[in-house]
Image: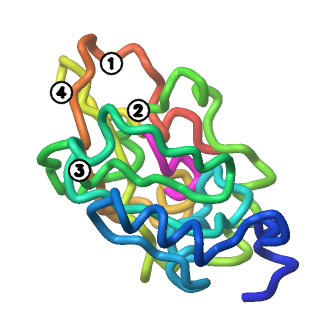
Amino acid sequence: MNRRELPLVTTEAVDLLRLRDALAERFQGEMRFDRLGRALYFTDASVHQIVPLGVLLPKTAENIVGRSYRFQPVVALDIIRCMGSSELLDVDPRTLRLPPERDSGADPGKLQRQIARHGKSVAGMPRLIVYRGSDGELVIYDGVTRATRVAKLLPGQTVPVEVIGDLPSPASAYPTVGERLP
C-alpha cells in the first residue's frame, strides 16, 4: 500500500493527539487512528475515496444519538455494528437486488479495476451489506461492484452478506446483479 493509491486527509490542520483525547473523553467504543486500521475500513472497493485520519466504532447507538461530533472529512463513524442485531447469510450474488441509485449495475471502470486487482479471489473480501425488503428480497447497500465481480467470474459462488435492517416496501421491482451482468 502506498500513498498514491490511498489519498489521505492532510494532517496539517488537525492536531491528531488533541482530537483523540477529546473523543476519548465522551466516546465509548473502538477508535482506530493507525494506518492499517483506517485502510481496512476504506479500501474495500466501496464508495470511499479518501482514507480518513481515524475510524470510530461505537459500542451502542446511544453512544451517538443526541451527540454532536464535528468530524468534517477527517474521521469516519461506522455505526452499522451498533444499530441492533444483524443477520449473516451466504447468498448467490446474482440474486441480490441493486439499489435504485445503482439500478444500471456496477460502474464498468471500477469493475475492471477490481477484476485486475482481485481476479477470482474472494479471500479477505469484506461481506456485503444489505437490507431486506418487505418481500424478503435482499437489496445491496454496500458492495455492488464486489457482488458483480463474483457473479461474473465465479457463477454459483456464494458470498457473505450482513442484513442490517428491513425496508418498509418490497424490493422485487429492483433489478438483480445477475440481470445487469456486463
Left or right: residue 91 compared with residue 54: left
Q: Please tell me which residue is depicted at 78% across the width and 71% down the height of the picture.
A: 11
In front: label 1 or label 3: 3
In front: label 2 or label 3: 3
Q: Please tell me which residue is depicted at 47% across the width and 46% down the height of the picture.
A: 142
In primary-sequence order, the first of circles 4 and 3 is: 3
Mark 1 vs mark 3, CA separation in Å: 28 Å
Mark 1 vs mark 2, CA separation in Å: 8 Å
**Label 1 sits on residue:** 172
**Label 4 sits on residue:** 136
Instruction: Report the amino acid beneath label 4.
Output: Gly
* Residue span colored magenta: 141-146
Question: Could you say where residue 70 lies in the image, as x and y percent from the top left?
Answer: 57, 44
Q: Is residue 120 visible?
A: no
Mark 2 vs mark 3, CA separation in Å: 24 Å
Mark 4 vs mark 2, CA separation in Å: 11 Å
Q: Secondary structure at mark 1?
A: loop
**Label 3 sits on residue:** 82
In front: label 4 or label 3: 3
**Label 2 sits on residue:** 97
Instruction: Report the amino acid beneath label 3.
Output: Cys
In primary-sequence order, the first of circles 1 and 2 is: 2
Q: Is residue 127 visible?
A: yes
Confirm or deny contact between disc 1 and disc 2 (CB under 8 A).
yes
In primary-sequence order, the first of circles 1 and 3 is: 3
